[in-house]
Amino acid sequence: MCGTGEYTTGWTGSGASTSDKKIGVVALTLFDLRRRGKVDKLGMVGVNGNKFPAIRAYLQENVGQVYKDLDISFHSFPGDNEVDPEACAYRHVLFLEPSLSPSPSFRQSSR
């Protein structure tokens, strides 16, 4: 997932979004696709890793505790509490190891 904002997670720098996307769109969809076996590991990339602990707590409260058996875990780039002012994390995720790529079943079913 590229970006950590409202459309991806529903979280804004000041807390929950007040829009119709208060639990995000992108992350929720990918968490559900993972539950269905269509994707495996998920990653989220941003510039400010200081946001990730708050995003994880927000997702746990608003998604994890609401949707039964939905794994809301993801790899974060940069790491938690790291800042990437040069946006190198975005370039890094372009070359992720295959284990963080979509699962083979997703690649086959999306053709």
Image (cartoon, grey):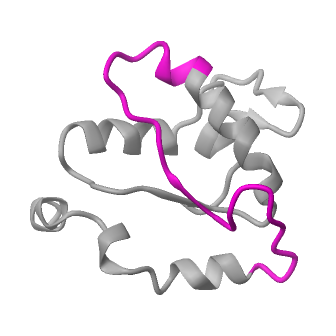
30 in relation to 46, above or below: above
Residue at the (71%, 48%) spot, across then down: 52
> Is 64 part of what is drawn in magenta?
yes
Q: How many marks?
A: 0
Instruction: Give the side of residue 108 with respect to residue 77, left or right.
Output: left
Residue at the (47%, 86%) spot, across then down: 95
87 in relation to 69, above or below: below
| Residue 98 percent across, percent down from the top left | 31, 78
Q: Residue 62 is drawn in which quadrant?
A: top right
Quadrant of the drawing holding the C terminus: bottom left
| Residue 8 percent across, percent down from the top left | 60, 45
Residue at the (68%, 63%) spot, across then down: 79
Q: Which residues are magenta?
A: 61-87
Front residue (pair 4, 72): 72
Front residue (pair 21, 80): 80
74 in relation to 17, above or below: below
| Residue 49 percent across, percent down from the top left | 76, 58
Q: Main secondary structure of the magenta part?
A: loop
Instruction: Give the side of residue 87 with respect to residue 2, left or right.
Output: right
> Is 109 part of what is drawn in magenta?
no
Q: Residue 92 is drawn in which quadrant?
A: bottom right
Front residue (pair 78, 87): 78
| Residue 42 percent across, percent down from the top left | 42, 56
Instruction: Give the side of residue 97 with respect to residue 20, left or right.
Output: left
Q: Residue 9 is drawn in which quadrant?
A: top right
